[in-house]
Amino acid sequence: MGDDFRRNLPLFPMGTVTQLTELTPRQIRYYEQQGLIHPARTQGRQRLFSFNDVDLLLRIKSLMEKGVNIAGVKEVLREQKQTSQPMRPLGPIKPDLSKAEVYKLMKRQLQELSSRPNQSHLIRGELSRFFH
DNA sequence: ATTCTAACA
DNA sequence: TGTTAGGA
């Protein structure tokens, strides 16, 4: 599927992502520090997020809202990574696309997000307590 | 105008 | 996590 190519295109700056996810820049940067997401950077060190990054952030947000802490989120993400098929990384990063392009892609993404019900997880709270 | 990092009265 | 300082 030469489609995950688009899913990984570095398209949106921080401002757009905060609106798409309703997460604060602080939270988003923190999740990156925790290794939950790996947004690309422009030459000016500014983050450029892909659809996959946004998707991931929404899943993280969902989990956190259910009481899952960072450790728990990492666990869930680790499990989901084993389940899904691996995809090769993205090479060079492109700066930006026209608004028309972005909106076209966004429409597609929104359709996918709503048609793919995210599995909910029972894991919540201090997961570290149950690790062994 | 936006975003970035570092740090905490 | 919020917020702010000081740069780019």
Image (spheres, coloured by chain):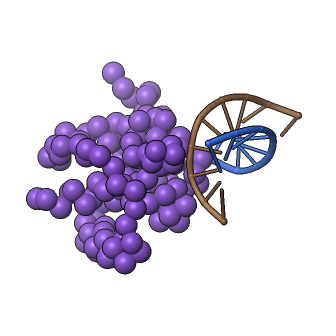
Chain colours: A purple, B brown, C blue
Q: How many marks?
A: 0
Indicate whether A102 appears above or below A24. below
Between residue A54 and residue A12, name the one nearer to us.
Answer: A12
- Residue at point 25%, 60% (across, down): A6
Residue A12 quadrant: bottom left
In this picture, residue A37 sits left or right of residue B9: left
In this picture, residue A98 sits left or right of residue A17: left
Residue A106: x percent and y percent? 35, 71
Locate the N terminus of chain A by quadrant.
bottom left
- Residue at point 46%, 45% (across, down): A43
Between residue A20 and residue A5, name the one nearer to us.
Answer: A5
Residue C6 quadrant: top right
Between residue B2 and residue A18, name the one nearer to us.
Answer: B2
Indicate whether A56 appears above or below A15. above
Between residue A86 and residue A15, name the one nearer to us.
Answer: A15
Residue C7: x percent and y percent? 70, 39
In this picture, residue A5 sits left or right of residue B3: left
From this viewpoint, which residue is outermost toward the left? A1
- Residue at point 39%, 28% (across, down): A130
**Residue A91 in view here:** yes
Residue A50: x percent and y percent? 36, 56
**Residue A67 in view here:** no
Residue B2 quadrant: bottom right
- Residue at point 53%, 40% (across, down): A30
Locate the C terminus of chain A by quadrant.
top left
Residue C4: x percent and y percent? 80, 46
